[in-house]
């Protein structure tokens, strides 16, 4: 989806994890993107991420967007610190009917648990559509909020995450879904 239309507000936010780009339509989050630090050497603790990620550049935003942005950053901080298990950020999804169905199904995967692509295909009533599920997950516009990082390969392998496998591993460790020793892999 192209979010360059004037109806969208784009806000770039940097913390120790890297740069996050939030896109809102009025007060609804439409897109969340992540770019790691360019050096590749930054490996923040959850506490550091929470400490340094402050919503402080919203002075020129419309009030509804400013409130939504501050709430999104606060909840992202809490999640990265392991203090939030679910997000309550209003969002608006742009995608095909199948994509939206897959993205909404992700909310049913509990914090700290994982599901396979096949499991998600079955959740949306298309048990043979594992590849299509993977394609939909790759296009997830609001990862973390709709937790596609909780979807793993059939044999338990960490595969296919748009924000990178290192980020997927770190998020699953924060949630306790995989042991911390896997960060060293």
Image (tube, rainbow, N blue to C red):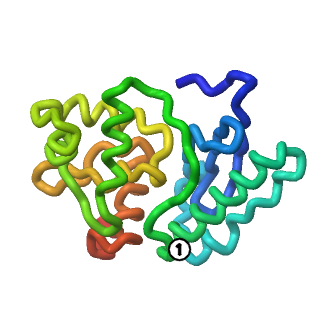
Left or right, 148 with reference to 24: left
The residue under the point 26% across, 47% down is: 159
Residue at the image point whose x is 63% and y is 50% from the top: 19
In this view, which residue lies farthest toward the right? 60
- Where's residue 113, x and y in %? 26, 65
Above or below, comparing residue 134 to residue 175 in the picture: above
Across and down, in percent, residue 165 comes to 36, 51
Report the side of 36 relative to 154 (left or right). right
Q: Quadrant of residue 169?
A: bottom left
Q: Residue at x 18, y 39 (%)?
A: 121
Q: Position of residue 163 (x, y in %)?
A: 45, 46
Is residue 55 toward the left or the right of residue 150 in the image? right
Disc 1 crowd rating (10 Å Cα; few below 14, some 14-19, many 20+) is some
Task: Decide which of 79, 95 is in the foreground and name it.
Answer: 95
Q: Nearer the viewer, residue 43 or 119?
A: 119
Residue 34 place in picture, x, y as percent = 55, 47
Q: In which quadrant of the rendered image does the C terminus lie?
A: bottom left
Query: In the figure, 28 relative to 18: above or below?
Result: above
Q: Nearer the viewer, residue 1 or 15?
A: 1
The quarter of the picture where residue 7 lies is: top right
Question: Above or below — where is 179 with respect to 131?
Answer: below
Label count reads 1
- Residue at point 53%, 74% (across, down): 81
Q: Which residue corresponds to mark 1?
A: 81
Q: SS for tag 1?
A: loop
């Amino acid at each position: 989806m192209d979010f360059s239309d004037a109806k969208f507000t784009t806000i770039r936010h940097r913390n120790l994890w890297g740069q996050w780009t939030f896109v809102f339509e009025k007060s609804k989050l439409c897109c969340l993107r992540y770019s790691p630090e360019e050096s590749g050497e930054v490996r923040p603790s959850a506490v550091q991420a929470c400490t340094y990620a402050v919503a402080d550049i919203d002075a020129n935003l419309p009030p509804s967007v400013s409130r939504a942005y501050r709430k999104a950053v606060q909840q992202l901080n809490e999640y990265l610190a392991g203090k939030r298990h679910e997000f309550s950020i209003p969002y608006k999804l742009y995608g095909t009917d199948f994509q939206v169905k897959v993205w909404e199904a992700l909310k049913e995967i509990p914090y700290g648990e994982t599901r396979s692509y096949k499991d998600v295909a079955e959740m949306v009533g298309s048990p043979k559509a594992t590849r299509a599920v993977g394609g939909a997950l790759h296009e997830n516009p609001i990862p973390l909020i709709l937790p596609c990082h909780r979807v793993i390969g059939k044999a338990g392998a960490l595969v296919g995450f748009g924000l990178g496998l290192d980020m997927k591993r770190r998020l699953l460790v924060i949630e306790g879904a995989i042991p911390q020793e896997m960060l060293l892999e």
